[in-house]
Amino acid sequence: MSESELPPPGTVRRRTTARVLPVRPDGKVLLLHGWDPLKPQTPYWFTIGGGVEAGETVGEAASRELREEVGIVLPADALGTPVATNTIEFEWGGCRIIQHQTFFAVAVERVDVTFANQEELELQTISKHGWWYGDDLEATGQAAHVTIPGLLREAADAITLRRAS
C-alpha cells in the first residue's frame, strides 16, 4: 500500500517516520497546516515528514520528504544528527497509527515553499504552511500532537548551538 492510500477503517498501522524541522534565523520553525481526511473541520499544525521506505535510511527519508512536501532540497548528509525521537499514537483516516518518529533540525535562511511534489492525499489534506515559535503554537492549542511545541523549542535551541560553534 502506498502512503497516498488510506487503509481500511479500524486498521492499526505501525510506521517509522523521518521528520524535519526547518528553523529560520529568528528561531521560527516551518510547519504544515492540515487535517484528518475524515475530520476536515478540525485542522491542526504538524511537522514535515513521512514514512521511511524500504532500503532508505532515516536521513534519506527525511531529505526526500523535505523535498516532496515543501520543495526544500537538502542532501541527507547535510541534516546532521537527529535532535529528538519519540513514539506517538493517534487516529487518522479512521485508523489507529503507532508512529516512531526521528526529528532533524535544519537551519534555513530564505525558503520558497512549494507543494508541487506532494502526493494526491497530501494535496487534499494540507492547506498551507506557517512559521511558528513553540510557545506561540502551544498557546493556540492547534498542534497535531502535544509534543510538537516542545520539539520546536528543541529544534531552535539545536540550531542556535550549531550556529554558535
Image: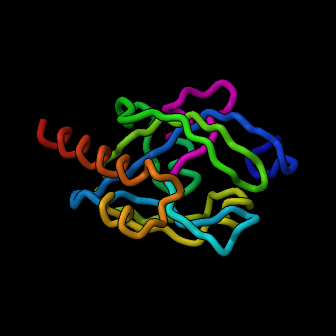
Residue drawn at x 33%, y 58% as measured from the top left = 134
| Magenta residues (range) | 47-62
- Report the quarter where the N terminus lies: top right
- The picture quadrant where one finds residue 158 is top left
In the image, taking residue 136 as reference, residue 30 lies left or right, namely right
User: Where's residue 74, x and y in %?
Assistant: 43, 44
- The picture quadrant where one finds residue 115 is bottom right
Which colour scheme appears in the figure? rainbow
Residue drawn at x 74%, y 38% as measured from the top left = 13
Taking the view exactly as shown, the residue that stands out farthest to the right is 8
User: Where's residue 144, x and y in %?
Assistant: 53, 57
Residue drawn at x 25%, y 57% as measured from the top left = 27
In the image, residue 59 lies in the stretch drawn in magenta: yes
Taking the view exactly as shown, the residue that stands out farthest to the bottom is 41
In the image, residue 26 lies in the stretch drawn in magenta: no
Residue drawn at x 25%, y 44% as measured from the top left = 159
Taking the view exactly as shown, the residue that stands out farthest to the left is 164
- Relative to the observer, which residue lies in front, 26 or 137? 137
- Report the quarter where the C terminus lies: top left
Residue 33 drawn above or below residue 78: below
In the image, taking residue 141 as reference, residue 116 lies left or right, namely right
User: Where's residue 102, x and y in %?
Assistant: 48, 34
- Relative to the observer, which residue lies in front, 94 or 33? 94
